[in-house]
Image: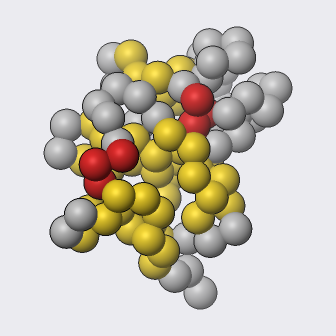
Amino acid sequence: MPEWYAACGSGELDAGRAILREVGGLKLALLREGDSIVALSDRCPHAGGSLGRGWVEEGELVCPLHRWRFRLADGRCTTMRGQSVHRFRAERRGEEVWVLV
């Protein structure tokens, strides 16, 4: 059964840049896009790059290793059809970010 976990302080998230956090035993890439909090699996399916070290361009998280791109809306890869990373439900509660893992 999924559980909610406190992942980070909301002030830790900058627009356009991901951070890496371990949440409920999983490594996640967390970021803020406008008023939304995005939580994606950290590991890029291409070569295992850390998406938590990536950046945002045009609504997509870019892997720093080989520039594969993943839509923030659903985790689908736009570089290689059929690839994706899991998107987790995330929300801001006061000054904390919580993720359902």
Q: Residue furthest right?
A: 47
Is any part of residue 58 visible from this angle?
A: yes
Question: Left or right of 16: which side holds 26?
Answer: right
Q: Quadrant of residue 97?
A: bottom left
Residue depicted at 64% across the width and 43% down the height: 42
In this rendering, the answer to whether 17 lies above or below 27 is: above
In this rendering, the answer to whether 1 lies above or below 68 is: below
Which percent across, then down, holds residue 48?
79, 32
Q: Quadrant of residue 47?
A: top right
Q: Residue furthest bottom?
A: 1
Q: Residue furthest top?
A: 66
Which percent across, then down, holds residue 50?
68, 33
Which percent across, then down, holds residue 9?
35, 58
Residue sitting nearer the eye, 69 or 80: 69
Which percent across, then down, holds residue 60?
43, 25
Name the quarter where the N terminus is drawn. bottom right
In this rendering, the answer to whether 63 lies above or below 52 is: above
Is any part of residue 75 visible from this angle?
A: no
* Count of number-bearing discs: 0
Question: Left or right of 82: which side holds 70?
Answer: left
Residue depicted at 35% across the width and 42% down the height: 13
